[in-house]
Amino acid sequence: MPSTSTAKLRTTMVQYPGEGVTIKAFVAQPESTKPLPAIVVIHEWWGLNDHIKDIAQRFAREGYVAIAPDLYSRMGNPVTKDANEAAKLMQTLQSQHALKDLNATTRFLKSQPEVVDGWKIGGVGFCMGGTFALTQAAHNSDVKCAVVFYGQVPPTDSLKYLVAPVLFIHGAQDTWITKQEVARLQQGLQQFSKPGEVISYPDAGHAFFNDTRLDAYRPKEARDAWQRVLAFLAAHLK
C-alpha cells in the first residue's frame, strides 16, 4: 500500500547511545529545508525488516522524519521470517530495555535539527511494537500522540498515566488481541478521561496492515486505517 506522494527521500541507518547499548535505527525523511515533526515507527516481533523500513518511508513521504529503532539491538540486530524464532526474540526482549531504548530514540530525535522544535514526536507501533507504543505513551512525555496497531493492552490501572492521545486500531477477528481486551481499553480511557479512539474492522484479523503477509493483509481496511492514521498524526503533530 504505497503512498501516493512522489516526494524525494533521504534514507540512512544511524546509531546512537542508549543505556548500555548502541541502538541502530533506520531513518527516512523528505528532502526538506525546514524542520519537520517526527514519527517513531516500532517494529513487530520479526525485527527491523524491510516492511517496517517501507512504512517509515511512507511516513517520510507524508512530511515526517521517520525513525525505526531496532529494539533487538541488544541481541545483535536479528531479523527473522520464522514465527517460532520471532516469538523467542520477543520473549527475550525485556520490556524495561525496550522502553529505555525508545526513550533514547526520542532523545536522539530532539537533538536533530531536522525535527521541528525537538518536540513534535509521535509513536506508531505494530503488534509487539504497538504494545510498546501504548506503554511509552504512559511513560514518556516527549511522545505527543500514539498509534497502536493491534498491540496488547496494559493493566487498566496503568492507563491513568497516559500522557498522549491514543489511536488504537484493531481487527475484530484478531485471536491475539481479543475484543474483550479492546473493550477494556475503551473502558479505561473513559474511566480516566484520557483522549483516545478505537477503530475496529469487523472482517480483519491480526497483522491486517502488513502487506507482506498475504495470509493476513486486508487491503481495503489497511487503506482506511492509513488515512485515519495520517489524519490523527496531522491533528497532533502538524
Image (spheres, helix red, strand yellow):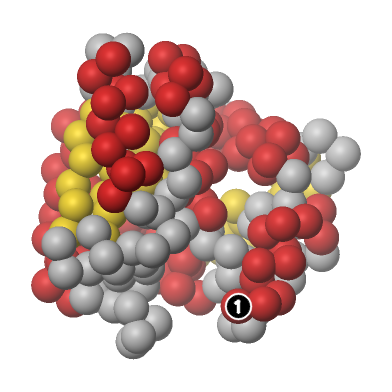
- Quadrant (top left, top right, bottom left, bottom right) of the N terminus: bottom left
Does residue 225 appear left or right of residue 104 in this picture? left
Looking at the figure, which quarter contains the C terminus? top left
| On screen, residue 124 above or below 10 | above
Secondary structure of the residue carrying numbered label 1? helix
Residue drawn at x 47%, y 66% as measured from the top left: 52
Residue at 22% of width from left, 40% of height from top?
198
In the rendered image, residue 210, in percent from the top left (x then y), is placed at 36, 72
Q: Is residue 83 left or right of residue 21?
A: left
Q: How many marks?
A: 1
Res 92 → quadrant: bottom right
What residue is pinned by disc 1? 83
Nearest the eye: 116 or 132: 132
Q: Nearer the viewer, residue 141 or 29?
A: 141
Extreme-front residue of the structure: 180
State the residue in front, 30 or 56: 56
Q: Amino acid at mark 1?
A: Ala
Q: Quadrant of residue 60?
A: bottom left
Does residue 138 appear left or right of residue 210 in this picture? right
Residue at 19% across, 52% down = 200
Q: Position of residue 110 (x, y in %)?
A: 53, 29
Q: Is residue 49 among what the camera can see?
A: yes
Residue 125 in sight in this render: no
